[in-house]
Amino acid sequence: MTRIAIPLLLATGALIAAVVASRSTAQSDLASFADDFDRGLCVGRCAASPWAIAQQIRGSVRAAPAPARAGLALVARAEPKSDGVAKADIVARLRPVGAGRRISVAFDLRVPAGTPLNSLQLVDLECATCGEGGNPGIRLYLRRGRLRVDRSKIGVEHAWTRDEAPTLANDRWHHIVWQVRVSAGNDGETRVLLDGEEVLAARGATAADLPRVAIDRVQIGITANSNAVPATAWFDNVRVVVS
């Protein structure tokens, strides 16, 4: 019995280690991916899940029955801003997307009544391996109902805005697409579409001017709530495409 059990145990252990390693490798080496959350939310070493980290700082994320549509969606809830911002988001680690390449993040968003369409950061495109603390990157956020791109974390003070752009509405699903060409120079580009209509387009730096220029993390959810009241937002049909 012992002679059979030991080799079997070793073989089983090796198989488990191989499966864990393959999941870990796949998760930290993503290129394009999609998630509709209909299988729930799994963070960490999960087969077929792109999400490596959940940031829940005075906030929470989970999959739940989606309002006004079939299936599940991601619901993010964040507490009001106090001494620090509240976070409720999930993070995918990408194979680094270098200068000159493009990344597109598409998703459905629904913000319920009671949550301001203001001071909510929705998507962060960052670099965690570019040699600088704080993960420099750019952020898609809402200000007075309009989508803007913040570049303060790459050293650019003024955000990209378009003040006459259409606004989002509470209690309605919107489809948002954010397209970025990665660059630390003036040949960088960004374009934002809301329900198929372009609401923002600009050229300029989209990454920090560092020895390594890249994006290797996508954060989506309420990546920061700067409101004095709690915030809730629903996310569905997330799709990230790298080209």
Image (tube, grey):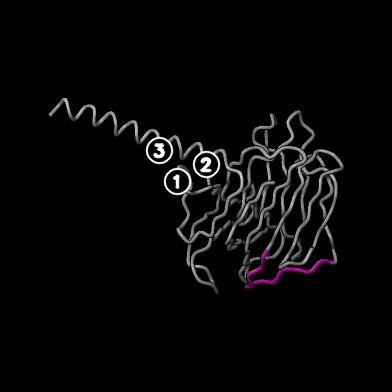
Q: Residue at x 40, y 38 (%)?
A: 19
Say which label, 3 or 2, has the lower sequence index. Answer: 3
Residue 19 numbered mark, or none? 3
Task: Give the crowd class for mark 2: few <14, some 14-19, many >=20 residues within 10 Å.
Answer: many
Residue 45: percent from the left, percent from the top? 45, 42
Q: Kindly report which numbered mark, 3 or 1, lies closer to the viewer in this rendering.
A: 3
Q: Tag 1 or tag 3, which sits nearer the N-term?
A: 3
Count the marks: 3
Mark 1 or mark 2: which comes first in sequence?
2
Q: Residue at x 69, y 71 (%)?
A: 169
Q: Disc 1 marks which amino acid?
A: Cys
From the viewer's side, name the closer residue of 163 and 72: 72
The residue carrying mark 2 is 27
Q: Position of residue 199 (x, y in %)?
A: 79, 63
Checking the image for residue 166, the label placed there is none
Q: CA distance from mark 3 to mark 2?
A: 12 Å
Write the residue at 75% across / 49% down: 180
Query: Circle 1: is it few (<14), some (14-19), or many (20+) Cα within 10 Å?
Result: some
Instruction: List the single residue furthest toward the top.
Output: 3
Q: Which residue is mark 1?
A: 46
Q: On screen, 17 above or below 48? A: above
Residue 120: x, y in percent? 68, 57
- Is 168 within the magenta? yes
Name the one closer to the observer, 207 or 18: 18
